Amino acid sequence: MSAPEIFNYLQQQSPIDRTIIVGGGIVGSALAYYLSRSSELSQIVLIDASQSNPQGSTAFAPGFVGQLNSIDHLTQVAKESVKAYQKIPGGFDPVGGLEIASTEAGIAQLHRRSELAYAAGLPADIISSEEASKIAPHFHAQDSQSQALFFGSDGTANAPKIAQYYQAEARAKGAVILEANVSSIDSHSTNSDNSNFSITTELGTMQANTMIVATGIWTQALLKSLDIALPIIPVAHPYAYGPSRPVREIKQPFVRWPERHIYARDHGEVDGFGSYDHEPVIGNPKHSALCDRVTESAILDAALTVFPKPAQRQSKAPYQGFNSMFSITPDSLPFAGAVPNVPGLFIAAAVWITHGAGVARLVADLVSGKSQGVDQAILEAFDVMRFAGQDPKVLEARALRTYNDIYNREDHR
């Protein structure tokens, strides 16, 4: 059916037991998947503005999944997410992750992360430069000063494929997926049908009793209609694909150079690389997560210097650079859970691919009344109103300070 036909079909149904998820990225799609399996809910509707041509952060994510974070709650939901992605055909490739350092301070940091990994139950081994060059020869050449930390259970996620899988499975269980742009959400209990929410789309207005906002970089703008302000800051980030090449016999692990804020991975027929080695730039998301706010050429040219082969380090290499946006927050944690004083409203936003399925499962359990199984410490850490009453400008500045330290090695309070 076409979008107008789906909309008209929904208008003929009672909204009393309807749950609407706004946002069809990896988080919203996973929510639809988990909720469609709940016997507590009768009608699940997933609405996304770019269903036929995805334009959110999920569509452009490089797909690196490094589970270890110095914030234990993030490590936990990352581990849960990897378990979920491994069940999806083509969803997760366990190539491993490699962090390389060459200074005394950087190597000491690798050893500290190794200890954190051990405590978290993640396999992680300190290896020599020679060993690193053997498992990632196109990303590292043996030298006398480097060491590396290898995470054997990390890998790369095909975020669009994961989202598509979750949507297909949800649809098979009766969920309805609608392509439409959502312009506002209104909360009230005076609807003639006793529903809690009215949602305005380009096709018309719909009602629902339960609303979940999973709109990533667009969350802040959409919540204005509900007079809710969350410090979710969209930032621009440069990434590039190198020239086409034959597929390697063995795919290499993704690699990070933490001292340089640079990372790279094998995409199959191309290599990809990105950099956090620049001042954070706030994005202005409109219809797509792509943007042109960062002059990526100078940043990416500098990033090329980490590669071992002279041909790879040439700044005039025919790479394809672009900027996409993702969300950051003042404490590097997502917003996930119920909104107090707005019955039926839930949020799952500022969530990375690494944590997508784990956070979605947490929120789905809350929505379907299974809160007894939810980790209360994680729920408290992800509390959607934890910054209520604080200065928005101060919160924005705190969030921007986290951009160059995405694995939370420092305290940014």
Image: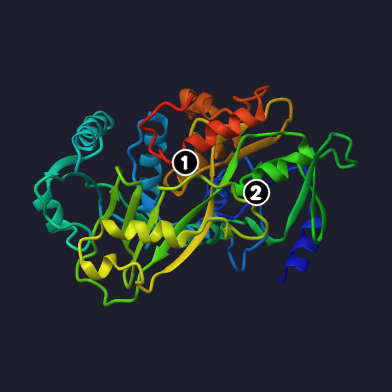
The amino acid type of the residue labelled 1 equals Tyr
Q: Nearer the viewer, mark 2 or mark 1?
A: 1
Residue of label 1? 403
Report x, y in % for residue 87. 37, 54
> Few, some or many C-alpha atoms within 10 Å of disc 1 (few <14, some 14-19, many ≥20)?
many
Q: 344 or 370, which lies in front?
A: 344
Identify whether 65 is placed above or below 230.
Answer: below
Horizontal and vertical percent for residue 117? 25, 34
Residue 289: give x, y in percent of width and height.
58, 57
Q: Quadrant of the N terminus?
A: bottom right
Q: Residue 107: percent from the left, percent from the top?
A: 19, 37
Q: Which residue is mark 2?
A: 218
Which residue is painted at 64% across and 36% down in the image? 346
**Depth order, front residue of 144/133:** 144
- Callout 1: SS: loop
Label 2 Cα neighbours within 10 Å, binned few <14 / some 14-19 / many ≥20: many
Residue 391 numbered mark, or none? none
Give the residue displayed 66% in from the left and 50% down from the top. 22
Q: Is residue 355 left or right of residue 245?
A: right
Cα gap from disc 2 to disc 1, whole angstroms: 18 Å
Q: Residue at x 39, y 70 (%)?
A: 319
